Image (spheres, grey):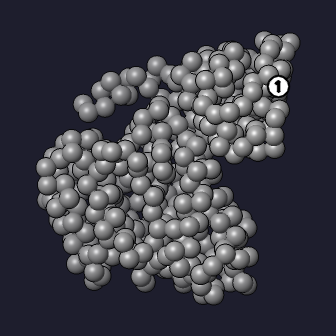
Amino acid sequence: MKWIEGGICAAKGFKASGVHCGIRSGRTKEDLALICSDTLCSGAAVYTTNKVCGAPIKVDRRHLADGKAQAIICNSGNANTCAPGGEHLAEETCKLVAKELGIPAGNVLVCSTGVIGQAMELAPFEAGVPMAAKALEEGSQGSLKAARAIMTTDTHEKQAAVEFELSGHTCHLGAIAKGSGMINPNMATMLLFLTTDAAISSEMLQKALSKDVPSTFNQISVDGDTSTNDTVLLLANGMAGNPQITAEGADYFTFCQALHMVAEKMCRELAGDGEGCTKLLECVVTGAPTVAVARAVSKTVIQSDLLKSAMFGQDANWGRILCAIGYTPGDFSVDKVRVWLESKAGQVYVCENAAYHEYSEEEAAKVLAEKEIRILVDLGQGDQTAKAWGCDLTYDYVKINGDYRT
């Protein structure tokens, strides 16, 4: 299993594009992405648990009810949430794509991201969808343009891909994603699209995705806000030619490993590009009595605004870590908690048995000056582990969100 180029187009038979269709007036950035497969795919998805959800999610639930899809259309600049006629517009957008690609509208999935509660019109899609269909291309450039088109406050495109073997057949799995703010998933994360040429049934594809979500996408937080439009879509067209995966076994577990590799890479990309952030934070919890406790502790730590602020200030205030551990829900003791702060500049041991462990403030400052910080927590009462990803909290986060609509 190895990393490769190509992103969402690394898998055989997938093409993508990104065009500007004018959803955001006065801007020229690509704002409409199209991804499609040469053949019908098995499909799987996870969606936000926010009670207020975008109109596209309601449409996608219907279109993916049979476990099949062939194309994804996604706009940035407007979330199509809490807006009049949102579902109708989403359905009409799917029909536009279906007409251009010559496929049924029910095999098109639709996503939107941007401002909530703002009315949308069909006109930009009527102009943009034909352009996007004509611009479809294979390889890294197609993936890059689609990744750029789904960005809102992101500072860079996010994509990844791996190559792996299933029963002697070379397979590929790739992804693009967007997400920078309003990130505290309860299902998946922001908008993230995955494609693979592995042959796998819809049922096993959904099982693999649902199994991976709790340890990856649900473990990200930038600001504690769960989006109305969070969606992860995974399409598999089977063009690698491997025997179709229809049950658990060696090929299924290899596929799950590939999915997890890409998912974890995207988690780091998303958390590290949090709005206004200067540092990626990764909390690794070991020695937990249960997986649930390990996940809860790691995510609670990276969600602490006080800790996030301390990391921005390069302050090794380990008490804030211990405080966050202490208010984490769950049945566990804090008596044996140990904490280290680590980066490529080194490691400092700051807390032992829930108390101060002597360390050099000078060395700690060097460790925290790096752009990627690992917070290592050993609960000392079991053998379960988990990770979570977040970022520091800076002045720029407030600036970005203070004038987000304007």
The residue located at (69%, 45%) in the rendering is 291
Q: Residue 155, percent across and down?
A: 46, 40
Residue 378, located in which quarter of the rendered image? Answer: top right
Residue 343 is left or right of residue 4, and the answer is right
Q: Is residue 13 left or right of residue 65?
A: right
Residue extending farthest right: 358
Report the quarter where the C terminus lies.
top left
Provide residue 139's location: percent of width, then percent of height.
51, 70
Whether residue 385 sits left or right of residue 173 in the image: it is right
Helix, strand or loop at mark 1: loop
User: On screen, 70 above or below 291?
Assistant: below
User: Dot 1: few (<14), some (14–19), or many (≥20) neighbours within 10 Å?
Assistant: some
Tell me residue 309's x, y (percent). Answer: 56, 19
Camera-nearest residue between 135 and 297:
297
Q: Quadrant of the N terminus?
A: bottom right
> Residue 149: in sight, yes or no?
yes
Residue 260 falls in image quadrant:
bottom right
Q: Is residue 74 above or below residue 406?
A: below
Counting every numbered tag in the picture gives: 1
Q: Residue at x 37, y 70 (%)?
A: 64
Q: Label 1 amino acid? A: Lys
Residue placed at 72% from the left, 43% from the top?
290
Residue 205 percent across, percent down from the top left: 54, 71
Residue 31 visible, this angle: no
Which residue, as the protein is rendered here, is positioned at the far front? 331
The residue pinned by badge 1 equals 336
Q: Is residue 294 above or below residue 258?
A: above
Residue at 45 percent across and 78 percent down: it is 41
Task: Say which of 84 and 380 sits in front.
Answer: 380
